[in-house]
Image (cartoon, grey):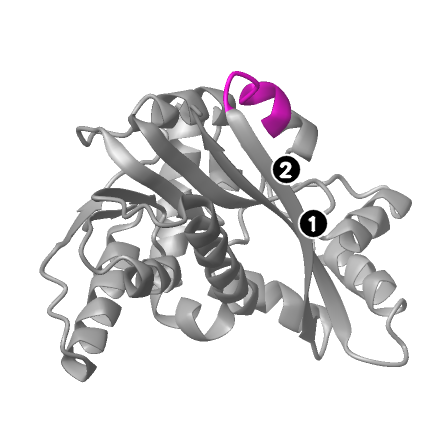
């Protein structure tokens, strides 16, 4: 029950951020472009016929992939109905500016941990969504089971060193870490050991005017969730934490590190 309520809350938070996400998600836009290029390199001359996207957000990855594979059939999904509608709106806006009609895209609301679409797919992809999965290992196997024999699962996800300084400040102040703990590269190597796996890590830095702006940015993109069953930090603790965090950036803007892992895997 707690997990169900947490997941409903997650969908609600991302839904509330649907309008602000496009202008505030700087890192997510960069990772979508990078992932799209890696997919193009991995597939080479192959043209995927059916593509499933998990956690589409406002459509960064959708639009980037479409530029590479305009003839594929796309199944675009997100756990948040508002995000799906926002993605659909962004695609329609692009269609009005271009000659493409985007009629080969199907949108639906779906929890990526419980895929209900019929495979197989030549490409299953996701940008910055898997870190919210509760049973990530099990979900990875469910998704790879939906691939064609030479299909590819490609995704980005936050890794263990994300917001490292913020979490170190929490530890030094004896404030419980509330954010989910993201997996390291070893987790994916072990979980996908039966597949051919390529793993790459990149560090992205987003700069803010203050620690409070950093937290507001997380809210604006719906990524301000606490861990399962945990309550938010109290006001007094938050003030102390912000003061300590900002003390590390006396000569410039506040920096937030995003430790991002890129994973591409296939059966062969």
Q: Is residue 104 left or right of residue 123?
A: left
Toward which corner of the image does residue 54 lie, by quadrant? Answer: top left
Q: Residue at x 72, y 69 (%)?
A: 211
Q: Residue at x 88, y 48 (%)?
A: 173
Looking at the image, which is closer to me, 69 or 159? Answer: 69
Looking at the image, which is closer to me, 265 or 226? Answer: 265
Q: Earlier in the sequence, mark 1 or mark 2?
A: 1
Quadrant occupied by the N terminus: top left
> Please, what secondary structure does the residue beneath circle 1 have?
loop
The answer to whether mark 1 and mark 2 are in CB contact below 8 A is: yes
Looking at the image, which is closer to me, 219 or 129? Answer: 129
Residue 128 drawn at (x, y percent) = 49, 49
Residue stretch rendered in magenta on the structure? 188-195
Q: Residues within 10 Å of mark 2 (few under 14, many from 20)?
A: some
Residue 136 drawn at (x, y percent) = 49, 27
Quadrant occupied by the C terminus: top left
Which numbered marker is on residue 182? Answer: 2
Residue 245 drawn at (x, y percent) = 82, 62
Q: Residues within 10 Å of mark 1 (few under 14, many from 20)?
A: some
Q: Residue at x 79, y 43 (%)?
A: 175
Q: Is residue 128 magenta?
A: no
């Amino acid at each position: 029950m707690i997990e169900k309520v947490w997941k409903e809350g997650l969908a609600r938070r991302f839904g509330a951020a649907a309008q602000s996400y496009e202008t505030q998600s700087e890192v997510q836009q960069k990772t979508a472009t990078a992932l799209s290029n890696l997919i193009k390199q991995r597939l080479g001359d192959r043209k995927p016929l059916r593509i499933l996207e998990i956690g589409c957000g406002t459509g960064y990855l959708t639009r980037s992939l479409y530029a590479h594979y305009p003839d594929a059939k796309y199944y675009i999904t997100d756990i948040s109905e508002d995000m799906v509608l926002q993605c659909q709106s962004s695609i329609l806006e692009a269609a009005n500016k271009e000659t493409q009609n985007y009629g080969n895209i199907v949108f639906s609301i779906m929890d990526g941990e419980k895929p209900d679409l019929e495979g197989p797919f030549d490409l299953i992809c996701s940008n910055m969504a898997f870190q919210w999965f509760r049973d990530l290992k099990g979900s990875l196997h469910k998704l790879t089971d939906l691939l064609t024999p030479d299909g590819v699962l490609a995704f980005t996800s936050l890794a263990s060193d994300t917001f490292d300084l913020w979490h170190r400040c929490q530890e030094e102040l004896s404030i419980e870490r509330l954010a989910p703990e993201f997996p390291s590269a070893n987790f994916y190597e072990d979980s996908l050991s039966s597949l051919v796996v390529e793993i790459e890590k990149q560090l992205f830095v987003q700069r803010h005017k203050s620690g409070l702006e950093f937290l507001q940015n997380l809210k604006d993109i719906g990524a301000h969730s606490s861990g399962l069953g945990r309550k938010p930090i109290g006001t007094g603790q938050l003030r102390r934490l912000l003061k300590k965090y900002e003390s590390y950036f006396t000569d410039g803007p506040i920096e937030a590190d995003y430790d991002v892992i890129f994973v591409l895997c296939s059966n062969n």
